[in-house]
Amino acid sequence: MVCTTLNMDQRKRRKELSQEIRKKITDKHVKGKGYKTISKQLDVPVTTVAHIIQKFKIHGTVANLPGHGRRRKIDDKSKRRIIRMVTKEPRKTSKEIQGELHAQGTSVSDRTIRHCLSQSGLHGRRPRRTPLLKTNHKKARLEYANLHVDKPQSFWENVLWTDETKMELFAKAHQLYVHRWKNEAYQEKNTVPTVKHGGGSVMFWGCFAASGTG
C-alpha cells in the first residue's frame, strides 16, 4: 500500500511527459491497446493517456503546439500607451484608462492596468498639497530668493517666517490619487493646489525663526 501511494504521488508531481513516452502511448494505442493497459504499462495516469491520444487524433502530433503556456494579458505596445497616459495626466484613474483603451479597440481590465502601472514603478499615491501659485507668485518668489541668496547668517537670524494653514473639521470632501515615479512627489502635475478659504475648517497661524518655532 505504501509503495502504491508513493507511485501515485510521483504521478501527480509530473508536469510534462517526454516526447519518447508520448510516442510510446500513441504507438500502443495504434496497436490496439486500451487506455488502462497503456497507463499500467507506462506508469502514466489514465487521464493523461487519454489526453495524449486525443491530441494525436486531432493534430497528428504529440509535440507541444505553438502558443503553449499562459497568454500575456497585455502586450508591450499597450503597456507603453498606459504609461504615457499617466505620465501626461497622473490623476487619470484606471477606469478612465480602460475606457480610452476600449475606444481604441483594446480590451483590458482595470485590475490589469493597475498591475501594469505598479510593475512599472508608477504607484498610486496621495498627492502632496502645495500652495496655489500663479505665474506672478512664482516670479516674485524667485526674485526674492535671488535677491537674498548671498545674505549672511546674521541677517537670517533676525527674520521671522510666518504662514497660515487650514485644517478640515471633518473628513475631506474627496480623496485623489496620482500615479507618479519615485522622487517626483513635488512636481507640479503631481500636487494638489490649496487655497485659503472654504467652509468646514479652522485656520491656524504659525511662525518660526532661527531661534525656534513660535
Image (tube, rainbow, N blue to C red):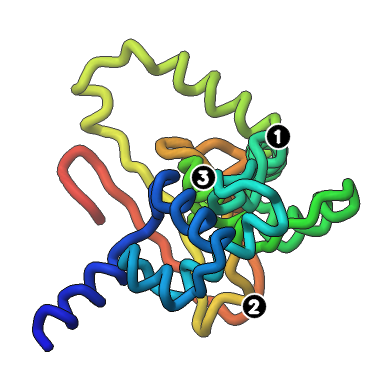
27 on left or right of 107: left
Element type where label 3 sits in the image? loop
Element type where label 1 sits in the image? helix
**Residue 6 percent location from the top left of the image:** 16, 76
**Residue 54 percent location from the top left of the image:** 63, 64
81 on left or right of 55: right
Q: Quadrant of the N terminus?
A: bottom left
- Amino acid type at mark 3: Leu
Q: Which residue in the structure is indicated by mark 3? A: 122
At a point 68% along the width and 43% down the height, the residue shown is 82
- Amino acid type at mark 2: Gly
Can you tell which quarter of the image residue 16 is in?
bottom left
Q: Which residue in the structure is indicated by mark 1? A: 77
- Amino acid type at mark 1: Lys
Query: What is the CA distance from the residue labelled 2 to the residue labelled 3?
Result: 34 Å
User: Which of 41/1 is in front?
Assistant: 41
Mark 1 vs 2: CB contact within 8 A: no
At a point 50% along the width and 41% down the height, the residue shown is 120
Label for residue 199? 2
Q: Residues within 10 Å of mark 1 (few under 14, many from 20)?
A: few
Q: Which mark is in front, 2 or 3?
A: 3
Q: Residues within 10 Å of mark 2 (few under 14, many from 20)?
A: few
